[in-house]
Amino acid sequence: MRIAVTTPTGNVGRHVLAMLVRAGLRPVALLRDPARLPEAVRGHVDAVRVDLTDADAVVAATAGADALFWVDPPGTGDDPTAHYARLGAHAARAVTENGIGRTVFQSSVGAELRHGVGEIDGLARTEELLDATGAPVLHLRCGFFFTNLLLQPLSGVVPVVLPVDLPMPWVAPRDIAEVAVGRLLAGWTGRRVQAVHGPEDLSWEQATAVVARATGRPLRAERVPDEEMRGMLRGAGLGERQVESIMGMSTGMRDGFVSEQPRDATTTTPTTLASWAWDELR
């Protein structure tokens, strides 16, 4: 079985690559710089230098693949949503032209809304483009990554626009990889959607308390007005479309949003925020 893996050095992709190697396969790693692969896995994978924004290169790099793990990596342009949609079109073209038998796409909770959730709108468009190929595709609707905490201050105050007591799914990237690899190896037919909700829903208030206990540093979440957050993002040098793409991921899901997939045995994964914070942050 020949499985192509995009973003093989990313938060999820690196685990996907390592798990496939441990399963006895030789995956194809698609990345801009093969030198970024960990030395331990270089002899066990076929590394292909490719820019995922180049459609022809994506098609060439995935030729002969039986399965594909696809991630829309973030871009540096002024319209993240359009960027994700373009990448989705490249993935769909590769699936169609190369006859790829199944694709696992790393999507997000909220993509089921299709519109009004910022950057996630681009992931929703990727879902639609992959669906249109008619090939088997599985959309992983992932919760809030634990690793997103690394973009926040780890002491003091974390400003958020969500109510600090609003529960939402939080998930370890490694758990997402485990679900993806299980599906890639087992196979399926048609279009499927599977949420990856982590072990429990947490509010920002609860999550920052967990991190504070693990690190021994004071940390709390504080809700700020939308316009204040926009000002912070502009102050960081982001353009208006970038600001609205980030804002939409919160504002689009704070008023009565309910995930399309309920929490059950198929969507709940084991790694707790406390164990991750102890291992990664402590």
Image (cartoon, grey):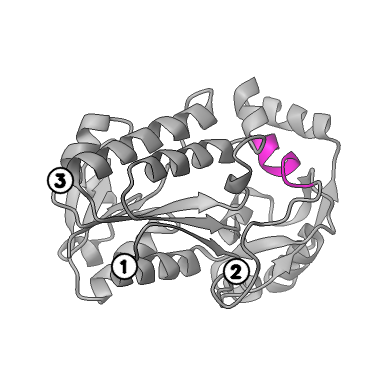
Q: Nearer the viewer, mark 2 or mark 3?
A: 3
Residue 196 appears left or right of 133: right
| Sooner in the amino-acid sequence: mark 1 or mark 2 | 1
Which residues, given as a range, are shown in magenta?
A: 246-254
Residue 213, position in %: x, y? 74, 72
Q: Which mark is residue 262?
A: none
Residue 246, position in %: x, y? 64, 36
Q: Which residue is mark 2?
A: 198
Q: Nearer the viewer, mark 1 or mark 2?
A: 1
Residue 115 appears left or right of 228: left
In the image, what residue occupies the spot 79% across and 53% down?
156
Q: Which residue is mark 3?
A: 63
Residue 177 position (above or below residue 103): below
Q: Secondary structure at mark 2?
A: loop
Residue 269 position (above or below residue 8): below
- Residue type for callout 1: Gly
Are the two marked residues, 1 and 2, in contact with CB atoms closer than 8 angstroms?
Answer: no
| Sooner in the amino-acid sequence: mark 2 or mark 3 | 3
Q: Nearer the viewer, mark 1 or mark 3?
A: 1
- Residue type for callout 3: Ala
Q: Which residue is mark 1?
A: 187
Q: Secondary structure at mark 3?
A: loop
